[in-house]
Image: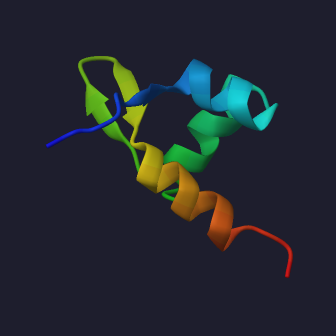
Amino acid sequence: MLRKPLLTVHEVADLLKVKEATVRQWIRDRQLRAVKFGREWRVAHVDLETFINQNANR
């Protein structure tokens, strides 16, 4: 099923070198797909890759 663990907002922010508030805003704006477990958001690796590819300069 899941080959890689889901990323936390903190981990996504660290990977992309942005603030956690920015990642939360992307999630709130539905730009970045995420799943909520209790009070915490998690992002699948594939969804992060999709987000990066959709927002890359061409």
Q: Is residue 54 above or below residue 51?
A: below
Residue nearest the observer in this picture, 2 or 55: 2
Residue nearest the observer in this picture, 39 or 57: 57
Q: Residue at x 35, y 34 (%)?
A: 4
The quarter in which the N terminus is drawn is top left
Q: Position of residue 50 (x, y in %)?
A: 53, 63
**Snapshot quadrant of residue 9:** top right
Horizontal arrangement in the rendering, residue 33 relative to residue 3 (left or right): right
Q: Residue furthest left?
A: 1
Q: Position of residue 37 (x, y in %)?
A: 25, 24
Q: Position of residue 43 (x, y in %)?
A: 43, 39
Q: Residue at x 24, y 18 (%)?
A: 38
Q: Is residue 53 above or below residue 19?
A: below
Horizontal arrangement in the rendering, residue 2 relative to residue 28 (left or right): left
Q: Residue furthest bottom?
A: 58
Q: Is residue 5 above or below residue 3?
A: above
Q: Report the number of numbered marks.
A: 0
Residue nearest the observer in this picture, 12 or 27: 12
Residue nearest the observer in this picture, 53 or 25: 53
The quarter in which the C terminus is drawn is bottom right
Q: Position of residue 16 (x, y in %)?
A: 75, 37
Horizontal arrangement in the rendering, residue 54 relative to residue 56 (left or right): left
Q: How is the image coloured?
A: rainbow
Q: Residue at x 60, y 48 (%)?
A: 26
Q: Residue at x 76, y 26 (%)?
A: 19
